[in-house]
Amino acid sequence: MSASTILQELREMSNYLGAEHRGYAIIGEGNTSARIDKDRLFVKASGTCLATMGPADFLEVSISKVTRLLDSKEATDDDVRETLKSALTDPAETRMPSVETMLHALLYAYPEYNFIGHTHPVFTNSVLCSVHAEEAMRGRLCPDHIVVMGRATVFVPYVDPGLVLAREVRDRVRAFIDKENQPPKAIALQNHGLFALGSNARAVMNITDMAEKMSHILVGAYSMGGPRFMAAADIDRIDSRPDEKYRQERIA
Ligand SMILES: [Zn+2]
């Protein structure tokens, strides 16, 4: 896929996720990105609005340059700002990439991901800002939940956005893959929002839509005495059925 096609799909995905009626992001909330090649990505420029973004509102960033601070224990806020700036591939660029660019970039270490969408959906955050956040996000409610979002979601307790959050997400995604033997399709950030991870733009939109629908159902189920999550054996069965695998591939 050419860089201009990637940018076009990223713009459409961003406008979809930012559309006001969906309630996924308002004003400057959320951020999106897409892989261009092994070391480059497009990411939302800081201060732009998902709903109205055009192709010029994305910046091109070097993945290796923006992630080099991840293991530096003494990095300050100034170091983070400097790293974000110096990772821009256009030296004449004066705008700043999204504050969560580091998080997007480290996830592209996994070849399964080509598009990423981060939003603050109303029902998803109703769950993520509640006392039941962790158990609610880990559970699975019905077969379509598994088909679109996989067997489980990575849950990340609240930590400082930016560098600390990026490190925490990196550790938890690694632990998830060790346990589940497959890369996650979604990351739920307590008191913050959702990351949807896809091989294409459609998958990111589907995952976000499904996360929000399931969260809406969770809010209802907790009001009815609490959700009845699917049993592990039933989740395994759906996840391994050939007809569901076929459906999973067709949908994405
Ligand atoms: Zn956010």
Image: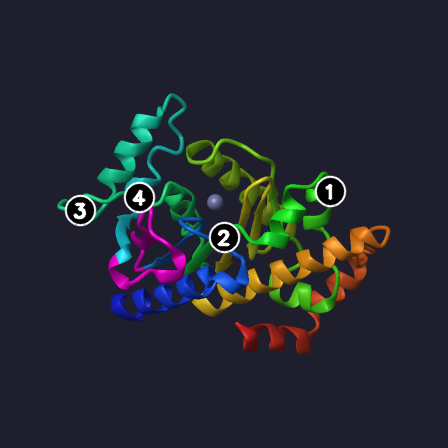
Residue matched to label 2: 119
Amino acid type at mark 3: Glu
- Marks 4 and 1: CB-CB under 8 Å? no
Residue matched to label 3: 93
Numbered tag placed on residue 78 in the rendering: none
Front-most of residues 38 and 152: 152
- Answer yes or no: is residue 79 visible: yes
Residue 34 on image: x %, y %: 37, 58
The residue at the point 37 percent across, 45 percent down is 101
Front-most of residues 150 and 157: 157
Q: Which residues are magenta?
A: 36-56
Given this view, does label 3 or label 4 mark the residue nearer the observer?
Answer: 3
The residue at the point 35 percent across, 58 percent down is 35
Given this view, does label 2 or label 4 mark the residue nearer the observer?
Answer: 2
Looking at the image, residue 72 sits to the left or right of residue 132; the answer is left
Amino acid type at mark 1: His
Mark 2 and mark 4: Cα distance apart in space: 24 Å
Residue matched to label 4: 64
SS at circle 3: loop
Mark 3 and mark 4: Cα distance apart in space: 18 Å
Mark 4 and mark 1: Cα distance apart in space: 37 Å
- The answer to which of marks 4 and 1 sits earlier in the sequence is 4
Amino acid type at mark 4: Ser
User: Tag 3: Cα neighbours inside 10 Å, few (<14), some, or many (≥20)?
Assistant: few
Q: Please tell me whether residue 52 belongs to the stretch shown in magenta.
A: yes
Residue 16 to residue 190: above or below:
below
Numbered tag placed on residue 132 in the rendering: 1
